[in-house]
Amino acid sequence: MDFALKKHEQDIVKAAREFSRKEFPNVAEQSDRNEEFIPGLWRKACELGFVGLFVDEDYGGAGYGFQEHCLIAEEFCAADGGLGAAILANTFAGALFHLFGTREQKARFLPPWISGEITLALAVPESGAGSDILSLSSTAVKEGENWVVHGEKTHVFSGHTADYMVVLTLTNPEASNPDSRYSFLLVPARNPEVETRKMRGKLGMRAAETARVIFSGTRVPADHLVGTQGQGLLELVELYAVIYATLAAMGVGVSRAAYEEGIRYTKQRVAFGASIFSLPATKAKLEAMATMIKAARNLYCEAAWSIDRGVKDASLPAMAKHYAAQAALFCADEALQMHGGYGYFEEYRIQRLYRDAKVIEMWGGGKDMDERMMASALR
Amino acid sequence: MDFALTENQRRIREKARAFALREIAPVSRASDLEETYPRQVWQKACEEGLVGIFIPREYGGQGLGFLELALVSEELSRIDMGIGLSILAATFGSENILFFGREEQKKRYLPLLTSGQAVSAGAYTEPDAGSDVAGIQTSAVREGNEYTVNGSKMFITHGKVCRWMVVLCVTHPEEKKRHRRQSMILVESDRKGVEANPLKGKMGIRASETTEISFSDVHVPCENVIGEEQNGFYQLMHFFDITRTMVAAQGVGLAQGALGEALHYLDDKTAGGKPLREDQRIQFQLAEMATMVELARTITYRAAWQVDQGVPDPALNAMAKYYSAETAVKVSGIALNLCAQWGPEAFYDEFALQKLYRDAKILEIYEGTKEVEKITIARRLR
């Protein structure tokens, strides 16, 4: 066992930290308030190699793993939750290609995605279906050489700006096993047959734009099915292992930012004749925060490490995500508390972190997916 | 021991509940989004007799107690704590007049509050002194029959809309005892040198007006002192000891509202053909939430009841506010997450629980942070 970061991992952390600390802070508050991403940031992140570095070198990636990807996720969200989330949510569909795409699909879509020429969105949730995955009702029916897609997806990250969308659809409704009824379809999104509407009013991670997407008879060529027909749900669980490991790392980033804000503020705020940092109750909270951050980081590192070793067990990423969410909630809550009334106002970064932390907890595949992911741990 | 509410208490609770549903609910979302002070709702609340109910009848109130006030606070906060605060805090600061003021001050000021002619404010917190109230810097220097007030106050509810504010000032800076340097002075907001700036961008209770106030050479007659000179700190502690029961009740109401929203949302949802409400994971969380709400309510009512019996218990009041505030934060947080596990709409502000979650956190900060409440409790443990 070796807990030290390797040389290349240290370099990645350093580069991600430099990039995000330089680019995020001065636009973070405005992005949060306006619920708008800074499009140029995605391009810059791509140019610097932060996107899709888990992809094989043959397809334009760095041939690293999800561990390196997660280290970047932590650093980005430590600089700003919303901007970090905006970039990372745009990597999930790429991960799906990486995991399940054919050679042709990878060769065609991954290199331009990694270099920032195209964007890919992942469209899974539906209004009213929530986490009951088996009640997702968007359908794709084969007509000649095309799939014809009908349905409405919601809360799709970058749904209104993406060039392509990977959409989970009901393709085999007659299959006797309900888990064998879904498939992922790649839908060219700049298409009059795809209607999108930007959604507003998110609690946190507001720089990560989301949209409602409506397919009314959208035609997709037959070779745009990603993965195996009918295996969409199993693939989704595997993809969620990656997503949850990433969310865990993002949660650690948010936790760390809250902790740093807590230290910074308590050191400068004087009450009862001394800095509130010097109060034993403050130190006890900061110690608890530091402990949770460390534990959450170790857990996501192990989760990502196991994914990179091909372990097909989603329970570790699920544990990592849940623990990191608790860490983020705890750290943001306590750090806001340390700010007193100031923490309740948007000029103070901790208010944003408090809202972002809650989103880490809420974000995921929902209760149904969590139970599927955790099932393997309960043997 | 009798835990039942009286007929009259039930009536005032029903009145507050009906008012909240009728007048507050329809404007709740817009007031939150636009951060607008709901003047009309406040006026209607005055007409309905929901403002300053604890003020004795001879001063225009209804002569009810703090338990009745808690019931009103709970019901308003159940629907919208921010708008509720605009009603509950319309008398804020003037409780000091009732507790410590001279007869003529009570007669002059209190009836204006209940009749909807004026709103008041309590100006204690400063940019550099919150929990450490005795650390305030705003000075009031006496010359003849006048005080000259200089300084600034922070996070003052109703600083802009109020007709007057009760300001904690340092009047005796040379006094050795740190807690004997302050006095409470009523400052009319139209006096020259008073400037209030609304503070925007709160996470929650966005309908409630929060301001920053500066006093530059504001001349105030000495008769505007409330209570005794040099007794300001102790008067303020008493003020908090009493009014905290109203804030505790806000937490009860918000938590109850959050639980109600979750139940309402989950009620008709099913998973794999089974109603969600039969899922044990969800059932247990709902049971935990309901238990916390009931405990918060019980301790709050008891604390308020003791105030009305003339035996207020500062530690109990602090416990009630601390526990209720924490309950509001926890219950709204669990409720929001439960719903998010079910539908992505929970992330957006059309979903009422999102606002409840943003609103809740202020309860652990204002009217004494929970840390101050823990200090209050711990000091009295024997």
Image (tube, grey):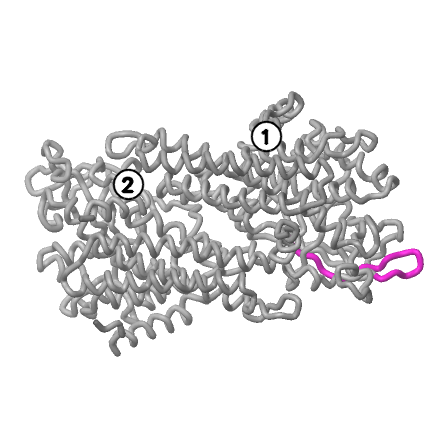
Q: B44 or B360, which is in the foreground? A: B360
Question: Taking A45 as reference, is B146 above or below it?
Answer: below
Which residue is under mark 2?
Answer: B130
What residue type is disc 1 on? Ser
Same chain for the residues at labels 1 and 2, yes or no? no
The residue depicted at 19 percent of the width and 61 percent of the height is: B307
Mark 1 is surrounded, within 10 Å at the Cα level, by few (under 14), some (14 to 19) or many (20 or more) other residues, namely many
The residue depicted at 35 percent of the width and 54 percent of the height is: B325
Q: B322 or A80, which is in the foreground? A: B322
Q: B98 or B293, which is in the foreground? A: B293
Question: Taking B28 as reference, is A37 above or below it?
Answer: above
Q: Quadrant of residue B56?
A: bottom left
Q: Quadrant of residue A72?
A: top right
Which residue is under mark 1?
Answer: A20
> Label 1 marks which chain's residue?
A
Q: Residue furthest right?
A: A144
The stretch drawn in magenta includes residue A153: yes
Q: Residue furthest top?
A: A7
> Label 2 marks which chain's residue?
B
What residue type is disc 2 on? Gly
Quadrant location, the N terminus of chain A: top right
Mark 2 is surrounded, within 10 Å at the Cα level, by few (under 14), some (14 to 19) or many (20 or more) other residues, namely many
- Give percent across and percent down for residue A242: 68, 42
- Give percent across and percent down for residue B13: 32, 72
Magenta residues span A141-155
